[in-house]
Amino acid sequence: MSPHARPRMHRSSTWIAFAASLLLSCLGSRGAWAETAVLTSDGTLYEVFIGPYQSVVAGASVVPYSRSQSFPVVALRTTPPNGNVTLEVVDGTYTAEPKGLPSVGVDESTGTVLVCYSKFLGLMSDLHIAVRRGGLWVGRDIEPSPGLYLSLNPRMTSTRQQYIDFDGKGGTVTKTRTIFSLVWWEESGLSQARYAPIFVEDGVLSVDAIVAFNLNDLVGRKGFTDISGLPSSSYMFPAVERDPSSTKGGVLVSFANLATRREQVISITFPDDLTKLTGASAAGGLPDAQVRAHVPIGRELGDGPIPMNRDTQADVGYFLSSTGRTTSWWTDSTGIRYIRNDAPADDPPKTLVVRPDFPVDRALSVLREMTLKN
């Protein structure tokens, strides 16, 4: 599916037709993603995937005539160094509604596991997070923009940041916090990518006050968004990776800005000295200063045209470099297809052929290395 044009979504009939075709496309696409697995420093592997309930929970398939055994659930597989695998259903996903490809992140300082995924509800799609800590699950929703909406294709990574704060005794202290960075695409009154940071500070995961930011606004390039002439797969896959050049727990983000009709690459960081924020005080800081400690700082690194020939039913992945260079890729029957963001808008995708002696993981490693070098 490649919707090439639509009016603005002020008419419900227009929204229904658009949402139905877009959801069919999303439900039909599948891929293998780095975001679906995290390896921690102690050697524990965390993986998330979508599968029928009966394949995740032992014994579910023997319940006769049970429709629930085929519910599409998000599953978490945990493999510690000793190889004793545990498999569990992510809280809130034991429902009949289809789910979008999940992502997983881990805060090693607290053992917190965070899973994000989208859930399709009729002609709308919600973004959810589920948090597991101490063997218990807690679920939260990410608030969408007002009105009709689709929240699609979430991607997530986590970073660590050192920062200075007041110690409550009249001095200062250096702390370290974990930042989960979540990006996704939202179709609502505007078509745009969004970003939400989730913090683990002083051992506390802040999931009750998650604030989402429009990436167009973050870089000061907002306005009317126009998808006319574009296949949906050319713009609805934002990407996020750790920024290897950042000392502040920063991330790199690539997203299509339909207000400028450019695919932008930015870095996102956060204040690293909370004592210097206006309104800060030794008593702990005014509420406004504490809020601004969690406001992302966006910096443009580069951009390129939105690729007209990235027209695919498959999920699209990215490799990002701190120089603003990106390579988007997807798989089909010919191998790995890819386009760099320095190519012309109408440039056809190149193909990296996969062979038994040159498997997918090796091909992707070569593709990433090419992106980072050039």
Image (cartoon, rainbow, N blue to C red):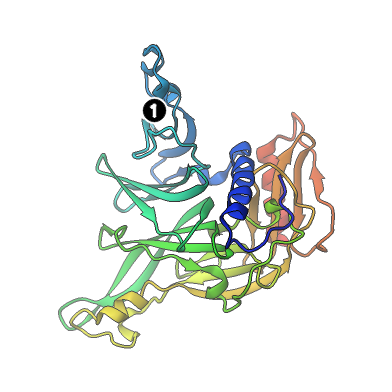
- Residue toward you, 55 or 236: 236
- Residue toward you, 60 or 21: 21
Q: Is residue 352 left or right of residue 221?
A: right
Q: Secondary structure at mark 1?
A: loop
Q: Residue 294, image x and y in percent?
A: 37, 71
Compared to residue 85, the image places residue 129 above or below, namely below
Q: Is residue 246 left or right of residue 345?
A: left
Q: Residue 206, image x and y in percent?
A: 30, 60
Mark 1 neighbour density, 10 Å: few (under 14) some (14–19) many (20 or more):
few
- Residue toward you, 136 or 100: 100
Q: Quadrant of the C terminus?
A: bottom right
Q: Is residue 243 visible?
A: no
Q: Is residue 89 visible?
A: yes
Residue lying at 77% horizontally and 65% vertically, measured from the top left: 342
Q: Residue 215, image x and y in percent?
A: 54, 69
- Can you identify the residue that label 1 sits on? 85
Amino acid tagged 1: Val
Residue lying at 63% horizontally and 37% vertically, measured from the top left: 28
Compared to residue 285, the image places residue 359 above or below, namely above
- Residue toward you, 322 or 253: 253
Compared to residue 187, the image places residue 40 above or below, namely above
Q: Is residue 207 left or right of residue 266?
A: left
Residue lying at 81% horizontally and 44% vertically, measured from the top left: 351
Q: Is residue 150 left or right of residue 158?
A: right
Q: Quadrant of the N terminus?
A: top right
Q: Residue 304, image x and y in percent?
A: 73, 67
Tally of numbered tags? 1
Compared to residue 187, the image places residue 83 above or below, namely above
Specify the farthest residue to the left.
169
